[in-house]
C-alpha cells in the first residue's frame, strides 16, 4: 500500500510538472510576434508603423502629448535630492532621480561654460530681473514664469498640444500658455537676432519625420533646473516621428560652439494623452511670482 501511495504521488507531481510546462509554452506562444497575444514591447524599440495621414498626405501629429522623463530637473543622469528649501517644504519639490536623455550620457561643455552651469544652479532661486544690472539675470527662468524655451518646453511636466496644417504647425504648452509657430518650408531667416524665448521655428518634412530648425533663441533660456544652458548662438534641430498611434519619438540636436565642444543630441518619447475630452488647462503663473519678483519695489 505504501509503494502504491508513493507511485501515485510521483505520478501526480509529474502531471503537475507537465501541465506547468505546457501552460508556459502556451503563454510564450501567445506573446510571440504576430500571434495577436499582445507581447510587451522592448523599451526603446517600436514595431514598423505608418502613421495616419492628414488631408495633405502628411503624418498626422495632431493631439495632446506629454513627456514622462525627469529631464526637466536635469538632462543628465541624476540621483534623488532635496528641493531648494527642504527645511520648509520637506519632500515637496524634492528632485526625483532620473536617467540621462543625452546621447552618450554627458553634455560636452567647454570648461568655462561648465562653470557657468554650476553657477546657474547655485543661483537658481535668485529671482533677478532685467534692470537689476545683471545680464543675463540670475535665477531659473522657470522660477520667474518666463517662457520655457526650446527644447525645454518639450520635457517639462505639462502637456503640449500640436495643431497641424499644411503650412504651419502650432505647438501650445500648458505652462504659461507658451506657444510657437513652426512655418513649413519657410525661406526667411529670423527678422531679429537672439531675441525669442521660443526661437524662430522653420519646419520641413523628411519622409515621415517633421524636422524643425530653431534659431534666434534668447540666451536667458535654461535647458533644465540643473542650470544647463546655451548662448544666443545656439542652433537646434528637432525631429518628431510618429512611431505608434500613442507615441512620438522626439530628438533635438543642440549646436552652440560658444558653449559646447561639439553638437549633442537628446531623445525620448512623447506620449499621447488618452483621457476622454483631454485638453490643455490654464496655467498662467504670473500672479504666482509677482511678490517674488516685484515685492521689493512696492511701497511698504
Image (cartoon, rainbow, N blue to C red):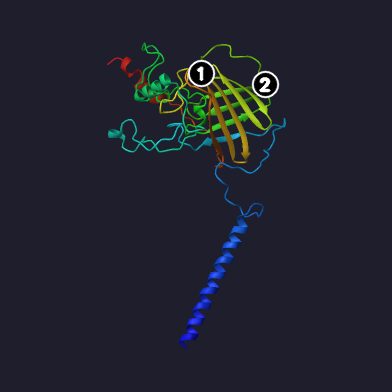
Residue at 31 percent across and 17 percent down: it is 296
Residue at 67 percent across and 27 percent down: it is 205
Where residue 204 sits in the image (x, y, percent)? 66, 25
Instruction: Work out whether residue 160 or residue 224 is closer to the camera in this orientation and state it.
Output: 224
Q: In the picture provided, is 121 more to the left or to the right than 186?
A: left
Instruction: Work out whether residue 251 or residue 247 is closer to the camera in this orientation and state it.
Output: 251
132 vs 46: above or below: above
Please tell me the numbered disc located at residue 188: none
| Res 116 → quadrant | top left
Extreme-bottom residue of the structure: 1
Residue at 62 percent across and 41 percent down: it is 245
| Res 168 → quadrant | top right
C-alpha gap between disc 1 and disc 2: 26 Å
Q: In the picture provided, is 219 more to the left or to the right than 243?
A: left
Please tell me the numbered disc located at residue 257: 1
Instruction: Work out whether residue 147 or residue 244 is closer to the camera in this orientation and state it.
Output: 244
Label 1 Cα neighbours within 10 Å, binned few <14 / some 14-19 / many ≥20: some
Quarter occupied by the C terminus: top left
242 vs 180: above or below: below
Please tell me the numbered disc located at residue 185: 2
Where residue 291 sits in the image (x, y, percent)? 34, 22
Say whether disc 1 or disc 2 marks the residue closer to the N-terminus: 2
Amino acid at each position: 500500500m505504501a509503494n502504491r501511495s508513493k507511485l501515485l504521488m510521483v505520478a501526480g507531481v509529474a502531471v503537475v510538472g507537465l501541465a506547468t510546462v505546457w501552460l508556459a509554452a502556451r503563454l510564450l506562444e501567445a506573446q510571440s510576434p504576430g500571434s495577436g497575444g499582445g507581447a510587451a514591447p522592448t523599451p526603446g524599440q517600436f514595431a514598423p508603423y505608418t502613421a495616419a495621414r492628414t488631408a495633405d498626405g502628411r503624418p498626422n501629429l495632431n493631439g495632446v502629448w506629454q513627456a514622462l522623463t525627469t529631464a526637466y530637473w536635469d538632462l543628465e543622469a541624476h540621483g534623488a535630492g532635496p528641493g531648494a528649501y527642504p527645511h520648509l517644504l520637506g519632500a515637496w519639490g524634492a528632485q526625483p532621480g532620473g536617467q540621462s536623455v543625452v546621447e552618450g550620457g554627458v553634455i560636452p561643455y567647454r570648461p568655462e561654460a561648465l562653470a557657468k552651469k554650476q553657477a546657474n544652479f547655485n543661483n537658481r532661486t535668485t529671482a533677478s530681473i532685467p534692470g537689476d544690472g545683471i545680464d543675463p539675470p540670475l535665477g531659473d527662468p522657470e522660477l520667474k514664469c518666463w517662457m520655457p524655451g526650446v527644447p525645454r518646453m518639450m520635457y517639462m511636466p505639462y502637456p503640449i498640444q500640436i495643431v497641424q496644417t499644411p503650412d504651419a504647425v502650432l505647438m501650445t504648452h500648458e505652462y504659461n500658455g507658451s506657444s510657437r509657430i513652426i512655418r513649413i518650408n519657410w525661406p526667411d531667416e529670423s527678422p531679429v537676432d537672439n531675441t525669442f524665448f521660443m526661437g524662430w521655428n522653420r519646419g520641413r518634412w523628411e519622409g515621415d519625420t517633421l524636422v524643425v530648425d530653431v534659431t534666434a533663441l534668447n540666451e536667458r533660456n535654461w535647458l533644465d533646473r540643473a542650470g544647463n544652458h546655451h548662448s544666443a548662438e545656439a542652433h537646434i534641430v528637432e525631429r518628431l516621428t510618429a512611431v505608434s498611434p500613442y507615441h512620438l519619438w522626439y530628438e533635438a540636436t543642440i549646436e552652440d560652439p560658444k558653449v559646447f565642444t561639439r553638437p549633442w543630441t537628446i531623445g525620448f518619447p512623447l506620449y499621447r494623452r488618452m483621457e476622454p475630452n483631454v485638453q490643455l488647462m490654464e496655467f498662467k503663473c504670473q500672479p504666482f511670482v509677482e511678490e517674488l519678483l516685484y515685492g521689493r519695489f512696492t511701497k511698504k
